[in-house]
Image (cartoon, rainbow, N blue to C red):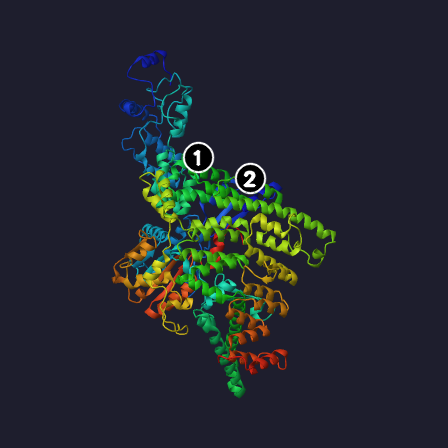
Amino acid sequence: MNRTKGDEEEYWNSSKFKAFTFDDEDDELSQLKESKRAVNSLRDFVDDDDDDDLERVSWSGEPVGSISWSIKETAGNSGSTHEGREQLKNRNSFSSYAQLPKPTSTYSLSSFFKGRTRPGSFQSLSDALSDAPAKSYAPELGRPKGEYRDYSNDWSPSDTVRRLRKGKVCSLERFRSLQDKLQLLEEAVSMHDGNVITAVLIFLKRTLSKEILFRELEVRQVALRHLIHFLKEIGDQKLLLDLFRFLDRTEELALSHYREHLNIQDPETRKEFLKTCIGLPFSAEDSAHIQDHYTLLERQIIIEANDRHLESAGQTEIFRKHPRKASILNMPLVTTLFYSCFYHYTEAEGTFSSPINLKKTFKIPDKQYVLTALAARAKLRAWHDVDALFTTKNWLGYTKKRAPIGFHRVVEILHKNSAPVQILQEYVNLVEDVDTKLNLATKFKCHEVVIDTCRDLKDRQQLLAYRSKVEKGSAEEEKIDAILCSSQIRWKN
Amino acid sequence: MRYIANLVNADKVAGRTRRYKVIFSPQKFYACEMVLEEEGIFGDVSCDEWAFSLLPLDVDLLSMELPEFFRDYFLEGDQRWINTVAQALHLLSTLYGPFPNCYGIGRCAKMSYELWRRLEEEEDGETKGRRPEIGHIFFLDRDMDFVTALCSQVVYEGLVDDTFRIKCGSVDFGPEVTSSDKSLKVLLNAEDKVFNEIRNEHFSNVFGFLSQKARNLQAQYDRRRGMDIKQMKNFVSQELKGLKQEHRLLSLHIGACESIMKKKTKQDFQELIKTEHALLEGFNIRESTSYIEEHIDRQVSPIESLRLMCLLSITENGLISKDYRSLKTQYLQSYGPEHLLTFSNLRRAGLLTEQAPGDTLTAVESKVSKLVTDKAAGKITDAFSSLAKRSNFRAISKKLNLIPRVDGEYDLKVPRDMAYVFSGAYVPLSCRIIEQVLERRSWQGLDEVVRLLNCSEFAFTDMTKEDKASSESLRLILVVFLGGCTFSEISALRFLGREKGYRFIFLTTAVTNSARLMEAMSEVKA
């Protein structure tokens, strides 16, 4: 199309034909006029070819230069996909800004700016599209080229959410404004499906700054819970801690940080990590527990190293007789105490592995201490130690046996460790409650105790009944007989 | 997902080309896709979904085998499985027709119900016009009744589950049970005739029953002495196999019983049950607390100790501060300091809480309300009610008569109410609720109970016209347990069914018991 210079000047100077801009609505009328003219001129050029599988949609009066027309063409070009068909139906949603500047026509703006133009027909619109704009070098003001809607993904938030629930592929990209995003989230939450909520949150996490995201989620509890769980699962510890910090959930922050220690296998590293946990905003009691955890591990490392050395040296009797079955690292406190009572009972308070030291450091209550020490010494059959545990001297110098845990417990533990009958008997005798005493004595065959108790209770029948349980001709039988014959006792039954 | 990604990426680095297929069951989550994408293997891996949602474990028991449901929802608040439940229900309704009467209680119940109804509407037409075969459906959240789930079970099936762990309807009996040197995996369902007769019975009856059966069996065997050839032939071809089968099953179950009894005696079961009953009834709380303390001191079992503490907490509306602190310290000392995390989980789930003085509650409330916009006010009430979930167990127990008044001995052989599943001491709350609602066909008259359960917004009914439902179908009730159900509850409801002429079908996200519940909450793998 060769224009003479003169024509162009004329064109330029004419006020009717304004430079084409991408201004929309206000220019509509002039656009329309231009388009109409373009159409009229184009009729000569247009080739009705449908080698691209275009749906022959009637133009319904839509001018060539308009969006709907170009969109149809584009849909055809991109290979009619299922989406394509759908979007053809959704034409109406497009706003009316023109996509093409102008087709090459007599009314085209400054072919002055154009490069080689092709005369004649449009073989396909892609040509037209690429032709016209590509060859136009004039900078144009208007909507960004990127906003050409050449695909349709037009589902509303509720439709999108519905698709997500079914597991369908759904690009959430079009929800760009904050309002849209939040609306999408609301829809997801009202659907109740956690998978969908998480999917939306994944999208929001990617496309929103964390401050905005946090701020919005702060007032949306359900979504917030899903985000927290999601972050936990994918292991995004950093963002999770940031979130807790933002929400001022100090305790959860501390716990979340503390939880990490479970992933650390090496004792030294774990110990160092625990040290960093001490200053965290736990509640007062929990802070004490964390401190104890650290101290415990610290101790265990020392004891373990020491004992391993002793064991391999082979000089210490206790390790030879009862080789260690497992390391003491990461064991609970009570287990550590048991270990210490087992292997280091006689040590003075000053050493790290002495039981007394442990008791003092961790403020172990008497009850627990006695129970554990008893279990350990009983296992070693160290009956003297057991005795010593319970023996106290009163102010007159007499010894007496007392226990913070109830002697019935003591008896059970002794029995479990196969204590000799005499020892058992001694402790059964110390049980205060008479019924319990009798029960235990019978259970553990402490004949003397049974006999004595029956006598004290003046229960003849029971004594008689018990007689059949003892060995014939044994000392116990004789004793029973002696008592039964005794005239000094006023039997109840 | 990361594990898979590591495998694939390792192969890539080593230059191996392979094809990978990942099968997700029951469904693939978007988070999984994200990880695959992130790790750069999205294109290398092809994904399939195996939408297996319902496993029939027995003639009346359907399990979704989703034990993670409990922790995911009740601890983390993640609603990911609600869709799975809705899908399963949709499947059932396409098979059996619509459910004319729906009842439910609980937040998750309501959400599952709503999503399910939405599904039904979308897939319109599949169930319309069909005759309903199941007349009622009842949705129940696990957190409506933690107490029942935490109690020790004493019906045979429950005991077997507690002792040996029944997985997917089958159990592994070790050598001590099979009296041989091999272990045996046994399928436990209604097909096992022996099992079917004893499964719902209180344990005290079981041994007697089994011995009697053994005697009968022996008598049958002995018949062969007096037989002639023809009779013998008949006997061998027709009866012997059956007898042998029965004999095998009998000896297995007798072995199981013996094993259970041995274990329980060792654990001092008697004492344990006594404490549990005291907690349920509200007597001797101090004594029970000391018992728990001792249990912890002796390092008996971390799961059991936890269970008892939770039971105490729920029945008493939380532990008093002194007890909470002291028991917690002792627990950490006995079982490991890392259980600090377990305690935090239990507190969040409402299983083990500290009694809060009134002021503390208001302080939190005012702080939280500052953050709330009007729009989200409803949502914050939700969150807050879970924060402040008060148990009110005693009040509910009184209102619903959960502790039966017994004059004389409670006959466990011929039980007269559902309390027999706990030796007559306690009627399971969940079962009682179902019983009451079914009787009234609505929540009428139960407002007080619902309020005490903190569920005023979450109790619902939905009745459609019943003209299409046959009377047969109206006796069939589908109970949906969200979060798991125990064998004790199943036995109790079976009993109720026999009494009232209903038939119950159970749909649960998983079969559970107290140990599984505690393990799910434990942060440290015990």
The chain identifier of the residue carrying mark 2 reads: A
Q: Residue A173 lies in what quarter of the image? A: top left
Asked if A208 appears above or below B127 in the picture, the reply is above
Closer to the eye: label 2 or 1: 2
User: Where is residue A210 shown, x and y percent of the image?
Assistant: 44, 35
Q: Residues within 10 Å of mark 2 (few under 14, many from 20)?
A: few
Q: Amino acid at mark 2?
A: Thr
Camera-side residue of B243 and B516: B516
User: Where is residue B330 shown, x and y percent of the image?
Assistant: 52, 53
Q: Residue A164 lies in what quarter of the image? A: top left
Residue ID for mark 2: A276
A237 on left or right of A305: left
Camera-side residue of B381 and A94: B381
- The quarter of the rendered structure image containing the N terminus of chain A is top left
* Marked residue nearer the N-terminal end (2 or 1): 1
Q: Give the distance between the C-alpha atoms of the residues marked 2 and 1, in whole angstroms.
A: 26 Å
Residue ID for mark 1: A210
For the residue labelled by badge 2, is the local secondary structure a helix, a strand or a loop? helix
Answer yes or no: is residue A470 visible: yes
For the residue labelled by badge 1, is the local secondary structure a helix, a strand or a loop? helix
The chain identifier of the residue carrying mark 1 reads: A
